[in-house]
């Protein structure tokens, strides 16, 4: 385990957890591509497994009504775990650089939603089919890239979920998909003791970052903060594309 990598990992998860704590989302979308710039996508996801789970647990507890949210969203969570497990299987046995491009593409889709209203009336028209689609396809993307925000946002907006429900659904899905993903990594021997050590260090950093993020939640201009986040994500996505395509 290289000291420079652990230092970079700690800095990345610190700032990503502050952002997540302050606006309720964003950890995986920021941390995953940044760590992936230093290594391959599978390594990035394995090192971020425990930190991601910790961020989700803190977010869920801070929003309250855990069992109520779990009862409400259990089916889509179940589908996402299935999709994520299959995505993780593909990741382990291919670990293609293409998945970095897929990650960059998902980030760009997320950013495009800010400027273009993506019509998805079929979701409200066929809610059951859409739930299957989000669960399985969203889980697959989560397993491959650690990011599923664009699909989640389109789905929850179309069904007119409240902001709190959207945040709870997102965090619950990520928590349980990460648990399922960990089981797949352990089964195929893709989660080493070295990775575990780095993850635990990152978890400690995340706890501090989340604490600060939640503290400043009511003291920031969320809209301005989100604009800065989007600029950062655009730069990161472009860096991933350039790195994967030309190097």
Image (spheres, rainbow, N blue to C red):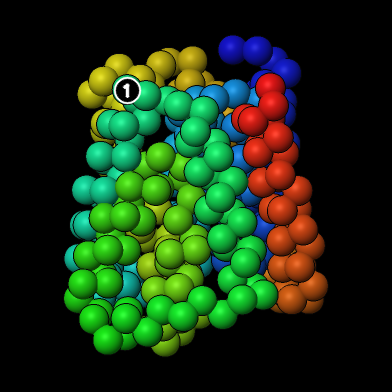
Name the residue nearer the viewer: 71 or 58. Answer: 71
Q: Is residue 165 visible?
A: no
Judging depth in this view, the residue of 183 and 230 nearest the camera is 230
Extreme top residue here? 1
* Residue at the image point whose x is 72% and y is 39% from the top: 239
The image shows residue 146 at horizontal and vertical percentages of: 46, 45
Task: Answer left or right for 80 relative to 109.
Answer: left
**Residue 81 at what x, y percent from top left?**
26, 50
Residue underneath mark 1 = 93
Q: Is residue 155 above or below residue 233?
A: below
Q: Quick one: 94 or 214, which is closer to the camera?
A: 94
| Mark 1 neighbour density, 10 Å: few (under 14) some (14–19) many (20 or more) | few
In the image: residue 75, left or right of residue 226? left
- Which residue is found at the position 37% from the left and 84% from the top? 121
Which quadrant is home to the C terminus?
top right
In this rendering, position of residue 126 left or right of residue 118: left
Depth order, front residue of 65/82: 82
């Amino acid at each position: 385990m290289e000291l420079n990598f652990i230092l970079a990992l700690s800095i990345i998860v610190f700032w990503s957890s502050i952002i997540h704590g302050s606006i309720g989302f964003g950890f995986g979308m920021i941390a995953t591509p940044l760590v992936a710039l230093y290594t391959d996508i599978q390594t990035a996801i394995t090192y971020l497994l425990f930190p991601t789970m910790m961020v989700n647990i803190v977010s869920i507890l801070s929003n309250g009504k855990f069992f109520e949210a779990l009862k409400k969203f259990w089916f889509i969570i179940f589908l996402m775990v299935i999709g994520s497990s299959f995505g993780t299987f593909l990741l382990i046995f291919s670990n293609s650089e293409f998945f970095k491009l897929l990650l960059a593409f998902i980030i760009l889709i997320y950013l495009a939603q800010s400027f273009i209203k993506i019509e998805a009336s079929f979701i409200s028209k066929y809610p059951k089919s859409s739930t299957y689609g989000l669960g399985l396809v969203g889980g697959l993307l989560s397993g491959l890239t650690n990011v599923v925000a664009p699909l989640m946002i389109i789905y929850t907006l179309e069904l007119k979920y409240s902001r709190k429900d959207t945040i709870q659904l997102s965090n619950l899905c990520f928590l349980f998909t990460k648990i399922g993903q960990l089981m797949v990594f352990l089964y195929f021997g893709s989660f080493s003791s070295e990775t575990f050590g780095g993850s635990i260090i990152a978890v400690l950093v995340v706890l501090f970052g989340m604490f600060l993020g939640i503290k400043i939640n009511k003291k920031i201009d969320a809209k301005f903060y989100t604009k800065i986040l989007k600029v950062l994500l655009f730069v990161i996505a472009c860096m991933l594309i350039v790195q994967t395509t030309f190097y």
